[in-house]
Each structure stands twice: as C-alpha cells, then as structure tokens.
Amino acid sequence: MEMHATRTIAADRMTVWAALNDPEVLRACIPGCEELTGSPEEGFQALVKQKVGPVKATFRGEVVLSDVVPGTSYTISGEGKGGVAGFAKGGAQVRLSDAEGGGTDLHYDVEAKVGGKLAQLGSRLVDSFASKMADQFFERFQAHLEGPASTETAEA
C-alpha cells in the first residue's frame, strides 16, 4: 500500500520540523496512541490500539528516523506487532519546503505492509484503513500547529 500527499501548514518550516520530532506532539497526533517514548536520535517506542474491520489489536512497535536533513527531510520506518492480529510495518519519506505565500508544504510518501489476520481482511479494507489513519494523523498534526479552526485538506 502506498500513499503520496502534500499538506500546506500555516507555520514556518522550523516550527513544523520541531513538532515532527517532538514525542508529545506525535503521541497526541497518532490515532489510538497510548504511549510514545524515546527520542529522534535513539528512536521511539509506541503502544497503539486500533480496530481494523472486525480485528482489534494492540500494537507495540519501534520507529526509527534515518537520512535526517534537519529542517528539510527524514525517512521514518517502523514495525508494530499486534499479537494474533498480525503485524504492520512500513515507512515514509517526509519532506518540508517553503509554501508559496507563506507557511510550509509537508510532503509525504508512505509505504506499508501488513501480515497475519490483518492481511486476511483484504487489501481494500486495509488500504482504506491505512489511508484514514494517515489522514487523521496529518489533520491532527496540522490542527496542533494551526489551532483547531484549521480546515485545509490534503492534496493527493
């Protein structure tokens, strides 16, 4: 499953960069995230509870940042294990650039894979769920930086 999108955030690039590296901001923005510990330098450990179709799962996983260019880009990769529900793993390339007229364009290219019971649900359901999760994360992230009145949507 792959997703590609850009969001324009009404904040300067260094503010967006700092938020992308702040465990508290990330924990608040990741749907279903109950715990997020660690640091950008050492990686993060997460506990996320989600329901995908009829399958409820608690995922424990690790996330690592690589290819870091401060203020500009990084690659985020991780894997979560959900017991009998299966696993999810993937990564994203995240890039920031100055938006025309001010603000920051946040570009992301995501690739994800699932296995176990999750894979048995069918690719359409899993792809739809993954897309919804990404949208929710970036909506929350944008609202965190701009305030809850933010109404901009992603461009695919």
Image: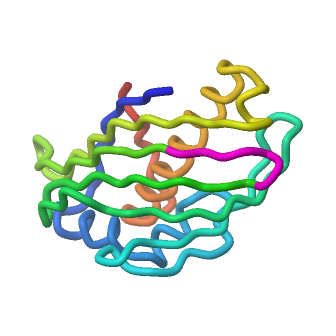
Q: Outermost residue toward the right?
A: 54
Residue 127 left/right relative to 37: right
* Residue 36 to residue 84: above or below: below
Which residue is at a point 18% across and 61% down the rendered structure image? 68
Query: Residue 80: x and y, percent?
Result: 60, 55
Disc tally is 0
Q: Nearer the viewer, residue 155 or 71?
A: 71
Q: Nearer the viewer, residue 31 or 90?
A: 90
Residue 43 left/right relative to 47: left
Residue 95 left/right relative to 53: left
Which residue is at a point 13% across and 48% down the rendered structure image? 97
* Residue 37 to residue 57: above or below: below
Query: Residue 9: x and y, percent?
Result: 30, 52
* Residue 100 to residue 31: above or below: above
Which span of residues is magenta-colored?
A: 83-89
Question: Does the magenta run of residues contain 84?
Answer: yes
Which residue is at a point 43% across and 37% down the rendered structure image? 153
- State the image quarter where residue 40 is shown: bottom left
